[in-house]
Amino acid sequence: MKDPWELHRRSLYLVVRRSIKLPFFEVFNEPDTIGSCAGRESTVVASQALTLLNGDDTFARARALAGRLWTECDGNASWAADRAWLLVFGRPMAANERRRAFDFLAAREAHWEKTPPSEGLEPADFGSDHLPPAARGAAWVEWCLALLNANEFLYVD
Amino acid sequence: MSTETKSSLLSRRDWLRHAGGGLGALALTSLLVRDGRLQAAPSAAPANPLAPRPPHFAPKAKAVIYLFMHGGPSHVDIFDPKPALTKFDGQAPPSEYHSLKLQFTDVSKQKLMGSQQTFSRCGKSGLEICDSLPLLQQCADDLCVVRSMHHDVFNHTPAIWMLNTGSSLPGRASLGAWLSYGLGSMADNLPAFVVMHTRPLKPGPGVWGSGFLPAVYQGTPIGTGPAPIPYVAPPAALGGEGQRAVLNYVQEMNRAHAAERADNELDARIASYELAFRMQSAAPEAVDLARESAATRALYGDGFGEQCLIARRLVERGVRCVQIYHGGDNEDWDTHGNNHQGQTKRLHEVDRGCAALLQDLSARGLLEDTLVVWTGEFGRTPTTEGKNGRDHNPYGYSMWLAGGGIKGGYTHGATDELGFRAVEQPVHVHDLNATLLHQFGLNHERLTWRHEGRDFRLTDVFGNVVSDLLA
């Protein structure tokens, strides 16, 4: 595929090879690739939480989301937080949610100031002039990982 | 948010249950407690749906390892030798069996087919086991073989549902889910109910699901091999401390989100994140077979044996129910053709694991309160399908139990002289499930969940404890 952005689509559009099962799909009850399937089973188990919390896929998405927010909002943290809420939850951020979000971001940034983050914890670079310093970037990646693990994002209301 | 808006969104039944037992409605619960409408819990912690609960009466078993032979082991070739079938091999089956409804064959058009297996009387008990299970034969005096199992569901998927949930239709709760609901969990850092399978199965994960019971009680599948639980460690860059911070924040958002909705799945997902966090430290150790001695590894062997060894390690660590599915896909017990070769291959695959499990549990003093169950969803026909296959037969088949207060060295019931139907001391799936619950100290008639206007049970409205099977 020439344009990697073409891969960033809902799994509905993903080309599936019958012989290869993706672990990410398997943990969410991917139907058997051989027979027909009338409906996807719905389960809630700890292995799904582990995959979403620790998996490479969500972590990469969290880095990409953080990079996108900073790029689109020209490094304005307040706008970026608003934008995140609209993108992830499809609604504006409430005042108490904003307070809590910035509490989290400040605490994590302070942590990463003391313990500089290792490589791999920075927001994805989309050619922005406004990428945050390392400690702040790491905090935003963590924050985005949290949003992608929130039930409000995972469940359709 | 006011209580008025909440109550109008929920049915009264859900609202009451949720207020008392859900994680999501903490705020409401505290309001009710303040108003004196609900008894305050002894601690301020949210009600834990997996907290240990006392059984109805003193139990014999604490855990069950349920070995499910997917596809249908052939009882007349394994535990139920039929000299008459051998004698009349190749002849037409008697007309009294022509009316049996089978999936693929019409009995009247088939021929009787004697077993090519040989059998031995084993142990002090003289229990009969085919010679393709040489290691299990050495455990004969621990086994309780039921030769008179029966139900009437002749197709795989609904029959597997039947065995697991007591109903051939999807939607009911599985045995493991009922046990988790009835007794809670003994393992803080591991799921109460773990499932292992290596090949695709006919039914989906609903067969270890919780049906109408809260979603927190469903089975958790794990894999095998070097990394049986994917992503059991946080990303290296993030580290454990960062992950706890992320998780706390996620859970805070999730609780606020769940408080405005009445959905036990949301509670279950909150609980699953907490369990996932604790599993990160406990699970890798629990499934790490490198911690076992070379002698133990050799005793169990690989493949199915490794799964049995993982099952023993899980049970030692307090997991209540471990279910292992053997078979599936094109290496199944479903021998519509080449019955003898197919069954023999499967028997050799499971022989070492089954025997090792029983011997090892016994040596560690765990067999006393660990039930081991070995069964398929049905047996196979005494008649042919095609040249040398056997069709499905749910009307009479064999399974075995061991440990957990079950009588060893005992053969229960009988099929007719050809092996078509259970005729002496028949044991229905409901009777089996009633007996399994009984060993856990649960009265199957009292373990209920109100759903759609009536109390549901694992045994529906049937089932009798088979006291002959009890030690």
Image (tube, coloured by chain):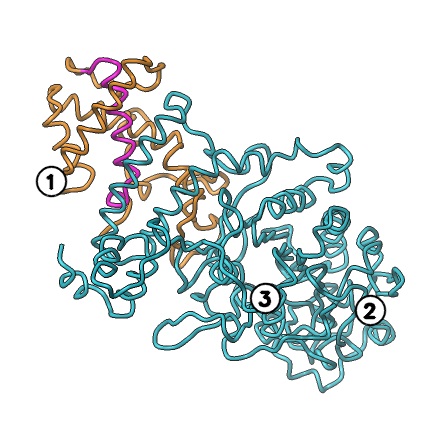
Q: Are marks 2 and 3 on the same chain?
A: yes
Residue tagged 1: A94
B295 displayed left or right of B304: right
Label 1: chain? A
Packing grade of label 1 (10 A; few <14, some 14-19, many >=20) is few
Specify whether disc 3 shares its chain with disc 1: no
The location of residue B181, given as percent across then percent down, is 47, 60
Rendered hue of chain A is orange
Residue A34 coordinates in the image, percent (x, y): 49, 50
- Residue labelled with disc 3: B441
> Which portion, as a residue range, is magenta?
A131-153
Give how far apart the Cα atoms at labels 1 and 2 are.
72 Å
Amino acid at pointer 3: Gly
Check whether the beta carbons of the residues at disc 3 and disc 1 lie within 8 A of each other. no
> What residue do we see at 84% from left, 52% from top?
B134
In screen coordinates, is B224 left or right of B82? left
Crowding at label 2, few (<14), some or many (≥20) Cα neighbours within 10 Å? Answer: many
Q: Nearer the viewer, residue A2 or B393?
A: B393
Q: Is residue B166 left or right of residue B31?
A: right
Q: Which residue is mark 2?
A: B81
